[in-house]
Image (cartoon, helix red, strand yellow):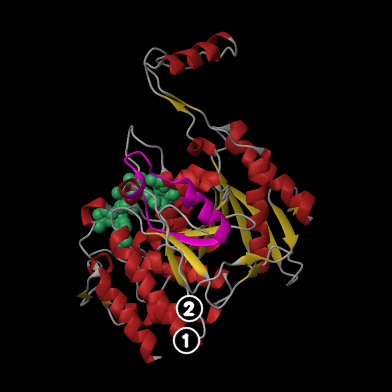
Amino acid sequence: MTYQHIQVPAQGQKITLNANNTLNVPAHPIIPFIEGDGVGVDVTPVMRKVVDAAVAKAYAGERKLEWMEVYAGAKATQRYGADVWLPTETVDVVKEHLVSIKGPLTTPVGGGIRSLNVTLRQQLDLYVCLRPIQYFDGVPSPLKEPHKTNMVIFRENSEDIYAGIEFQADSEKAQKLIAFLQNELGANKVRFPQTSGIGIKPVSKEGTERLVRKAIQYAIDHDKPSVTLVHKGNIMKFTEGAFRDWGYALAKREFGAEEIDGGVWLRLKNPRTGKNIAIKDCITDAFLQQILLRPVEYSVIATLNLNGDYISDALAAQVGGIGIAPGANMNETVAMFEATHGTAPKYAGKDYVNPGSSILSAEMLLRHIGWTEAADVIIRAMTKSIQSKHVTYDFARMMESAVQVSCSGFGDILIKHIEQE
Ligand SMILES: NC(=O)C1=CN([C@@H]2O[C@H](COP(=O)(O)OP(=O)(O)OC[C@H]3O[C@@H](n4cnc5c(N)ncnc54)[C@H](OP(=O)(O)O)[C@@H]3O)[C@@H](O)[C@H]2O)C=CC1
Ligand SMILES: O=C(O)CCC(=O)C(=O)O
Ligand SMILES: [Mg+2]
């Protein structure tokens, strides 16, 4: 296969799907990657070096990831033309190769292009945004007991106000829609109809069910004690409230969950372990204080798109910040891994920020393709590096007697620990 600007690595082979949707991973799988805007130029090369070292260590040269650069964001406009922010071949390649990783991409505020990150998720229908919140010993945290925060976020990734159905104030479309709301639907509560922008928030039963199903299955597979549906359903009754109701109904119908003491919370027996899994819910504002005050009570979190975005960064802060917050966007067959943070423009190109988030996203990728030995090598090296207190600025500013290192410097420390194993 030839592409317009993508160079296919000569030694690599595609990951393919087996009949039961499991992955068939060759020894030299081609992994498409998007470098990313802003600090993408800093973290992505470091991530690749560290991952290569971990794979080489774990498999003594018998396995190797074959990186294939694909383009999106500013780099795509340089290659494909001024208006081509997300080339079709990038989306096609990410889909065909099943497993990929991306750096952050810039989204302008208030106008300009819509989010390329969201577009990729939508075009590929990567409806789960999976963001584990894991504490590494020694990471500085604003909490007294950061190890008590141990959660996995399942953020709905395909709908909600992220669908991008918005109309600018004063535009003809906004005026038409407001008139339609007033005249046809009797909705007269737009406070300033002449000057309002309007956004639409679609939340569906199918979208909710497929996300909540994945979250409950994850709790079963990973022996987790609870799944919490986080929503603002008291205010947004037919979107966020429906998310809660559809979620509970699915837990009953598909997983046999039963009511606890006549309340709305449910309980199901984990078929693998025999232990109980609580299915509960929490309203988002209360949830944001509970995770600080009583984090041990929460484990798997299933939530809508915008809530999930806010909760991701808030929970990341509890375990050290978005410098060490990995993630994945996935569906049944395709997975695209990415850090939780963005392009941090003030640090772009300065070899300064923490590459941890990107490296741990790659660690998730390795686990996803079954290369658990290499993933474990990364986790061990990460733990040792943090404990050595040679860390990037974000950790150094919160740690006592730390030695501040650069982005690539932290990568080199990880590689040193990998090679010394
Ligand atoms: N998935 C994606 O591609 C995402 C893209 N974005 C986009 O990124 C752009 C910038 O967004 P912004 O709101 O500033 O959010 P960012 O996540 O880019 O940065 C916010 C702050 O988080 C800290 N931070 C971010 N990355 C790191 C890192 N690797 N190591 C250490 N600290 C880090 C920095 O904190 P401090 O100032 O304290 O040092 C930084 O100023 C926007 O265009 C936004 O749309 C945002 C999120 C996700
Ligand atoms: O797409 C963006 O620019 C921001 C997305 C974001 O913050 C996220 O997915 O966490
Ligand atoms: Mg975010």
Q: Nearer the viewer, residue 282 or 384?
A: 384
Q: Is residue 2 above or below residue 236?
A: below
Position in image of residue 219 (x %, y %): 64, 63
User: What is the quadrant of the C terminus in the image?
Assistant: bottom left
Q: Give the labeled residue for mark 2.
A: 64
Q: Amino acid at mark 2?
A: Lys
Q: Secondary structure at mark 2?
A: loop
CA separation in Å, label 2 and label 1: 7 Å
Position in image of residue 133 (x %, y %): 47, 63
Q: Does residue 63 appear left or right of residue 34 in this picture?
A: right
Quarter holding residue 111: top left
Q: Nearer the viewer, residue 417 or 213?
A: 417
Asked if the stretch drawn in magenta spans residue 56, the answer is no
How would you rate the neighbour count of disc 1 (Cα within 10 Å): few for under 14, some for 14-19, many for 20 or more? few
Q: Nearer the viewer, residue 368 or 99?
A: 99
Q: Is residue 320 above or below residue 308?
A: below
Q: Does residue 121 appear left or right of residue 42 in this picture?
A: right
Q: Does residue 179 appear left or right of residue 25 in this picture?
A: left
Magenta highlight range: 79-106
Q: Nearer the viewer, residue 147 or 36?
A: 36
Please tell me which residue is depicted at 35% across the width and 85% down the height of the picture: 417
Residue 300 visible in the snapshot: no
Position in image of residue 87 (x %, y %): 44, 46
Instruction: Give yes or no for contact between labels 2 and 1 (Cβ–Cβ under 8 Å).
Output: yes
Position in image of residue 360 (x %, y %): 43, 69
Asked whether mark 1 and ligand 1 are closer than 8 Å, the reply comes as no
Q: Secondary structure at mark 1?
A: loop
Please tell me which residue is depicted at 41% across the width and 42% down the height of the picture: 115
Q: Give the labeled residue for mark 1.
A: 61
Residue 3 visible in the snapshot: yes
Q: How many marks?
A: 2
Q: Amino acid at mark 1?
A: Gly
